[in-house]
Image (cartoon, helix red, strand yellow):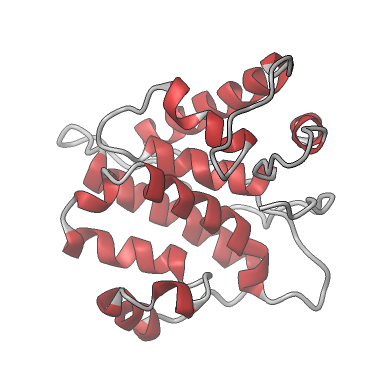
Amino acid sequence: MERLQSLLDKLPAPLEPLDISMLDGYLCGVLLQPKAVPDAQWMPAIFDSEGRPLPPGLDLAPAKGLILRRHKELNQAISQRQWFDPWVFELDDEAELSETLMPWVAGFALATELFPGLMKQDAAELLEPLAMLYLHLDPEDLEDADELLEEIESMEPPVDLEAAVESLVVATMLLADVARPQKEGTPMKTAARRPPPRKGPPSRGRF
């Protein structure tokens, strides 16, 4: 993770790469599409969220290798409905819970904007898991989604960071059941509880 963040931080301006927490949510959003998205389509947004052409001569191979490794890990977890540890990092003690989770959720939201296949699935089935994620975003960003806002208002927010991180995984698996259903009779293997996220160096917040 530190190596990948370092590689992304070294990209020249005006590029605005995702930080690794946003990248992790973005990859989950990509992997939850009903049809697999080719690497060449989803990879560029990681190096610049605005979609600008990359300058020639950049050696992106080391970063791409690490990104593809994480993509493979997440794909396996989602396919087999297994627990994964989201790349979410604690902020300072004064930070609100949603501030900590917002980068991951923002990355997921970016993926659904670029690749709308997931959002075209049954709206009723998507409502609860999307609310579990989007409750960490600014309500003003959801002003045109009345049903989603009502669902968020009806939910009890996570009580601590451990529960909040768990909700990211559970929501991901519920969305996978809609967009990437397993064969009937395949058990969900997601663990009930996992430790809260590790402390890590803050990103440069370039998104």
Would you say 162 lies left or right of 201 here? left
Q: Is residue 138 visible?
A: yes
Q: At x 67% / y 64%, what residue is drawn?
A: 100
**Residue 56 found in image quarter:** top right
Would you say 2 lies left or right of 138 here? right
Would you say 46 lies left or right of 143 here? right
**Residue 60 found in image quarter:** top right
Q: At x 36% / y 31%, what residue is drawn?
A: 79
The x and y percentages for residue 9 are 80, 38
Would you say 199 lies left or right of 28 here? right
Q: At x 76% / y 51%, what residue is drawn?
A: 198
Q: Is residue 83 visible?
A: no
**Residue 93 found in image quarter:** bottom right
Relative vertical location of residue 158 with respect to residue 177 in this rendering, above or below: below
Relative vertical location of residue 38 with respect to residue 181 in this rendering, above or below: above
Closer to the camera in the image, 178 or 137 = 137
The x and y percentages for residue 144 are 32, 75
Closer to the camera in the image, 13 or 92 = 13
Q: At x 37% / y 32%, what residue is drawn?
A: 80
The x and y percentages for residue 197 are 69, 54
Closer to the camera in the image, 46 or 158 = 46
Q: Quadrant of the N terminus?
A: top right
Relative vertical location of residue 196 with respect to residue 42 in this rendering, above or below: below
The x and y percentages for residue 117 are 26, 43
